[in-house]
Amino acid sequence: MIANQISLNPEREAQYLFTEPYTYSNGVIVTAADTDDITSLEDLEGRTTAQSSTSNWAQVARDAGAEVRSVEGLAQAAELLAQGRVDAILNDNIAVLDYLAASGSTDVKIAGEVEGESTAQAFAFRQEDTALRDEADAALAAMADDGTLTEISESYFRADVSTEDGEGEADLSDRASDNTAWDVAQDAAGPMLRALVQYTITLSLLSMAIGLVLALLVALARLSSRPWLHWPAQGFISLIRGTPLLVQLFIVFFGLGQIGIKLDPYVAATLALSLNVGAYAAEIVRSAILSVPRGQTEAAATVGMGYALTMRRIVLPQAARTAVPPLSNTFISLVKDTSLASVILVPEMLRVAQDYAGASTEFLALYSLAALFYWIVCALLALGQGRLETRLERHMA
Amino acid sequence: MSTTPLLSVTGLRKSFGDHEVLRDIDFTVDPGTVTVLLGPSGSGKTTVLRSLNTLEVPDAGTVRIDDVEVDFSQPRGRRDAEREFFRLRCQSAMVFQSHNLFPHRTVLENLTEGPVHAQGRPEEEVVAEARVLLERVGLANRADAFPGQLSGGQQQRVGIARALALQPRLMLFDEPTSSLDPELVGEVLGVMKDLAAEGWTMVVVSHEIRFAQQVADQVLFLDNGVIAERGPAAQVIGDPHEPRTRQFLHRILDPI
Ligand SMILES: Nc1ncnc2c1ncn2[C@@H]1O[C@H](COP(=O)(O)OP(=O)(O)O)[C@@H](O)[C@H]1O
Ligand SMILES: [Mg+2]
């Protein structure tokens, strides 16, 4: 596995093995097309910039006296800029050129350069993969010699960024994109639907199933008079309900990864969502069980049933009827919560919409489309809930 | 009488917190006889009955039904206790004041639930028996109805049939008619009279004095956690010795 387009800096060079640089970039200041009073770092004093929180441009902006808003990526930053919510963006010209070329946006422009902030990008390898690195170096050298690199650069960025002194000035004369919101939405709908089925729905179903089993066990433990069952269950519910799902996702994915438990994004998301459903549904199941009259348990005991049989045949079927409406709410929330899995690299529907929105800047159209899809799924669920309730109510006086 | 009692209760005690509800209850019930428990509300009748099947666990004393005896004074582990209580519970069947039928099961399923799923008896056999029992309580045509679709009197007759389906040694009734509309009381008492005539051993908590007079072999008058008076129905109801029995009967028979 290799990582590409990694900006070189001394810390990284100590940690990884790099090829010779294949692109060079320098810092640029991006502003809205109609802004003309920001052309250099000095002009950022007292202004607001939008920066990806992990980039070192955020620090450069801060040093220049600007207030920094953290955003997810350049596309979101550019949208904030176009909407006038921030004044400028600092970034590598290469990233900006890439964005401008891909999006065809004319709302923002490169307004100036950042002096002395030039960087080189290379492929990064693990320290031990020397042979692989050398191969890549040889390939890069060949591409540089026969002009392939320059050609590629021109075609992607409309500028040659493959040499240190190359002109990073883009020729954007014919870049205007003629993709309408409607076109983009049409393009995105297929992949979004696929992601909806493949990730959003399967993640919801799987997490609901695992979560329900967990919830039942936790509820029974919480109802137990044995303290060693009761207290852990209580603690689990309190912990999960008392912390944001987003934080739980981060802990399961990034946190556990750091101590060697590297879970696949999908597995990590399933785990976090199941725990979440488990805690919320446990309280629902518990109160549903408590809502079954004590006489039912007593009658079950007098016909010879033990605890397990009483639960399975007498109490839980009756508790189900009470629990279905609130559990349906939990399920509907879960479907919507799967969108958070995008932050731990699960390519679910909202992530796909984000990607299309980033590339096209059609935020309104794509996010609305995502909302529509979620709404349809949740409406269908609500319909199913109604039918299930009718079925369960059938014989109850 | 020289027969061995089917039920013997000795030294039964029970407190709820500081409240001593049963103090030293002793009595026996011979096989094939009907015992009626009378007494004011809160005197401990229900607690006595529920002690016989360990729905309430007494603090001290012994209960023996047929060949199963539990000594509640004896300390024991949770698991052992559960096993012993379970064995005792299987000796009797109970009809509750509020019938406690399983609302999500049909009438027939209410009868077969215990024998098939708890006792593990063959379903065909149990279903056939259950239909006979429903016939006997006059509900053969409601086998597939759900409890919620029946009248109170019909529900209580299903409750009785459900208890009978367990083939218990002893039938326990806790005020089976007191939550019924007056015109529905007769059909339930009628079934109970039939059972008594068939030789079932029954312990009945009831305020139906006429039923007690007609059916009871033994009447126990409970007051404040002790058996204040006991004897044949004719004596305890017809000629009570204890003033508090007399007072109670007077209040029941002539409430205004
Ligand atoms: N589970 C319980 N917890 C506390 N007190 C109880 C409980 N069950 C019964 N009692 C009390 O015990 C006394 C006897 O109750 P019970 O046996 O139901 O009387 P009866 O059936 O004669 O009306 C009453 O004072 C009642 O309040
Ligand atoms: Mg009572």
Image: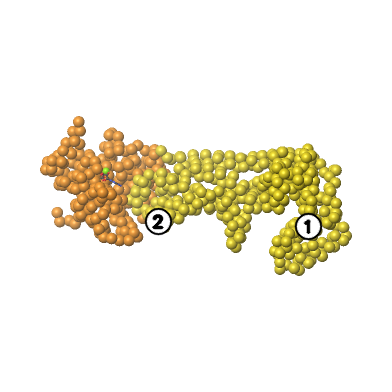
Chain colours: A yellow, B orange
Q: Which residue is mark 1?
A: A120
Q: Quadrant of residue A251?
A: bottom right
The C terminus of chain B is located in which quarter?
A: top left
The quarter in which the N terminus of chain B is drawn is bottom left
Marks 2 and 1, how far apart at CA: 61 Å
Q: Position of residue B31 (x, y in %)?
A: 21, 52
Q: Tell me: A112 left or right of A256.
A: right
Image quarter for residue B154?
top left
Vertical placement of residue A376 versus A272, above or below: above
Q: Are there few (<14), some (14-19), or many (20+) residues within 10 Å of tag 1?
A: many
Residue B178: mark = none
In the picture provided, is A216 more to the left or to the right than B253?
right
Instruction: Please name the amino acid that badge 1 sits on.
Output: Ala
Answer yes or no: disc 1 within 8 Å of ligand 1.
no
Q: Say what secondary structure mark 2 lies in.
A: helix
Depth check, front residue: B57 or A9: A9
Tag 1's secondary structure?
Answer: strand
Name the residue tied to disc 2: A227
Q: Which residue corresponds to the image point at 63% horizontal and 50% vertical from the top-left?
A: A343
State which image quarter holds ligand 2. Answer: top left
In the rendered structure, which disc, 2 or 1, sits on the residue that comes first in sequence? 1
- At x 54%, y 52%, the residue is A274
Q: Which-is-in-front pick, marks 2 and 1?
A: 1
Front residue of A74/B173: it is A74
- Residue A334 visible at all: yes
